[in-house]
Structures are given as C-alpha cells and as structure tokens.
Amino acid sequence: MKSGETMLPRARIPYGTWGSSYFPAWQTSPLAEVNIGQFAGEASSRILGIRKVPKDELEYLVIGSTIPWHWKFWTAPLVSSCLGKRLPGYHVEQACATGLQATLVAAGEVQNGACDVVGVVTFDRTSDSPVGVFPERRSYERTVALSDVWDNFGFDPATGNAMITTAGIAARKYRLDRKEVDELAFHRHQQYFAAKESGFLGRFLVPLEVLNVQGRALGTVDEDTGVRRLTLESLRAMRELDNCVTGGTQTHASDGMAMLLVTSPEKARQLSPRPEIDIQFIAKTEVRTLPSLMPEAPTVTVQKLLERTGLTMKDMAVVKNHNPFAVNDAIFAHVMEYDWHNMNNTGCPLVWGHPQGPTLTRVLIEALEEAVDLGGGYVLVFGCAAGDVGIAAILKVSEGR
C-alpha cells in the first residue's frame, strides 16, 4: 500500500453525527438494572435526534457487544426496533477490539455498495453479567457454571493466565520502571480532567435517562462515575498487584454504549452539520503476538501498519489507544521512541473505564474530535484484545473550504 492511498475510498464517517453515553463504573448507575441492548437502541435514537439525523436515512445496522444480554439471539434487528427503525443487520464481537472492528465492518458494507448509510452501535454491561450453565456431557463435571466477565478477565484458556498477568509479563520483558508507569497514569488522569473541564467531552457524551420496564425513570447517566482524582503520591503508595500494575495503573469494569455512522461521501456531506469535514479510512492491521503479551500487541500492530502505509509517527496528528494498563502506553513509547505525553490528550480507557464493546468506539470519536480541533490530519487509533491480539487503524481528517 502506498502512502496517500485509502483502503476504503467510498466509506466516510460524517462528522458530528456520533455520540456516546458516559461510562459509569461497575454497579454504580441505573445501567446495572436494564437490558443493555434495549438501552443502546433507545440511546441511539436519542443521539440521532440531537444530531438532527433522520432515522429514515439508516439502511443497515452493525452492532457490537461482548457480554451476553437477554435476547442477544436477535442482535441487530432487536436493537434497531428499540431505535425505532426496523433495519436488517448483524452482530460483531472481538473482545476489546469490538468497537473499532464494528466500524471497519460497517465501512466494508458501504465500500461494497450494499448500503449508503450504516449505523454502528456498540455497547456492553459488565454489571450483573449473566451466569450460565454449560452442559459438559464429556466431562466428569457434567455441567459447568459460566460467569462471562470474571471467567474471561481472570483466565485465558490458551495460557491459563489472567489479563493482569499479561501486563506483569510484558512489564518484565521491557524492564519498565514502576516510577515511570505511575507518572504516566497520573498524567492520563490529568488529561481526562482537563478535557472534562474544558467542555470537550460534552461535545459527544450525551446524558441519558434510564427507564425501568414500566417506563419509569431510574435515573440519569451523566457522569463517568467511578473516575476519581488521583495524586502521584497516592499512586506510588498503592500495592503492586503484578510488576508495574496497581489499582491506579489499570482500568476498571464499566457499562455504556457509543454509536456513529459510516456512509458514502455524498451522504456524509448531506448528514454532517459540518459537511466540509471529510473523514476517510486509510488502513487497518491486526497482529497476534506471543502468548500472554497483550500489552505489546498494539505496538507491534502499529509498527506493521506504518510499514504497510509508508507513514511515520511524525505524520500522526492524533494518537489514541485502548489502554487497559498504563504498561501498554509505556511499552509503546519505548519501542516507538514516542513521547507518551503527546498521546491520549483528551482522556482514555485507562481512566474512564472499560465496558469492552463500546470502548474503542468512544476512543475513535474522541480522536476524530481532537483532529478536527487541530485542523485535520492523520489519526492513529489502536488497542489490544483477548490475551495477545492487537488492532490498529489510521483515518484521515481533512477540512475543505
């Protein structure tokens, strides 16, 4: 692939037609009590209304989630019914990469000419995640209880290691210094609160009312509940759970949804409140590293992506990632010789939480908003998933006159 080319020349993301809920931490909001698929559909309807996008413009729906929810069998048709528009569509799932992957899948639908306007709705609820029973007829146990969130966070069946262990292993491999990792995490918190106080987050985070099955208000989700201000001294005083990993240098489980549109160039100009802004998909790559080295996977993926495109880190106007551990960013900075102060400028999942499905969708939205503020340029979005997988994509924001 040559520099300047785009892998999906027909696909666009119309600026300003997106939105996200806040991401309240596990068990801290009314989201813990509702069907998250239904909430995501209804919230998408609310966001489209705020953005003045007629629901009749939607032709197709790609949804993404990773945690079982009641009626998940019906996937996109159910979510679209809750949105208020009967649409075909399907479900995408790739652990923490889901939010970015669903967007790329939607771009493929537009690129192949099947649709001109595809809605991407991603969501997950870690709170009260279901516990099921699996009939294991070939085992002496006969039945096995499945706790989807905690089983998978705590155990990679390919290695037997927990996700937190991958951070410790990677930290040892790269000989990271605990002092630097604490300073990095502290800086990430400062970035988040600066973005919040400036009003930046309010441009795309939408307060959403949560209703019970009778339609009565349970409350409003209007904060990234669970995010707290940390001092460098408090971070340094935290007990080390694994090498360079403490409660303050890793993310937390949360709930939420995020949505955006992928369209043709013509529809992007029609639907966007700022039609002069053009958002293109340049390239995407995925890589799998050695087992239990998840925090290094995004870095290896970005290296491959830059090699494929002929671009460099100096070409990137915005760099933003899904970082469940501060270790991820430290490894990236060391290997890429890139100053970690210059990435995740408006917040990141390390601070505002990790509901899995919508995590990278919110990362992408934040990154594109930041690029618009800078007058355009290349946007690098990347992250890790499922023990040892990395995903990365480059988009380009241009502003015409």
Image (spheres, rainbow, N blue to C red):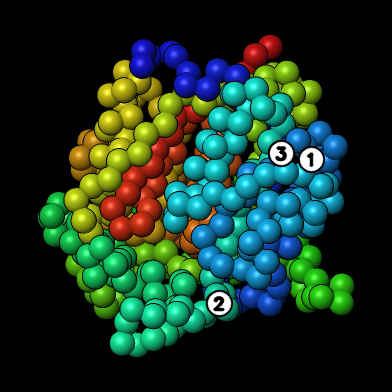
Q: CA distance from mark 1 to mark 3?
A: 18 Å
Of the pair 196 and 84, the residue shown nearer to us: 84
Name the residue tied to disc 2: 130
**Residue 184 visible in the snapshot:** yes
The numbered mark at residue 51 is: 1
Percent from the top left, x then y, of residue 294?
28, 54
Q: Badge 1, how many Cα within 10 Å: few under 14, some, many 20+?
A: some
Cα–Cα gap, marks 2 and 1 = 34 Å
In-image side of 267 versus 191 (left or right): right
Q: Secondary structure at mark 2?
A: loop
Please, what is the three-letter code of the amino acid marked with disc 1? Answer: Arg
Q: Secondary structure at mark 3?
A: strand
Q: Is residue 38 above or below residue 315?
A: below
At mark 1, the secondary structure is loop
Q: Left or right? Give the position of 68 relative to 116.
A: left
In this orientation, does residue 190 appear? Answer: no
Identity, as a three-letter code, of the amino acid under mark 2: Pro
Residue 265 sits in quarter: top right
In the picture of the structure, the residue carrying the numbered disc 3 is 60
Q: Are marks 2 and 1 in contact (CB under 8 Å)?
A: no
Task: Characterize the local packing of mark 3: few (<14), some (14-19) or many (20 or more) Cα atoms within 10 angstroms.
Answer: many
Residue at 77% across / 37% down in the picture?
Answer: 58
Left or right of 162, for residue 88: right
Point 18% across, 61% down: residue:
169
Question: Are dots 3 and 2 in contact, CB under 8 Å?
Answer: no
Nearest to N terminus: mark 1 or mark 3: 1
> Residue visible at 79% across and 40% down?
51
* Residue 165 badge: none
- Which quadrant holds the N terminus? top left
For image coordinates 30% across by 76% down, the residue present is 238
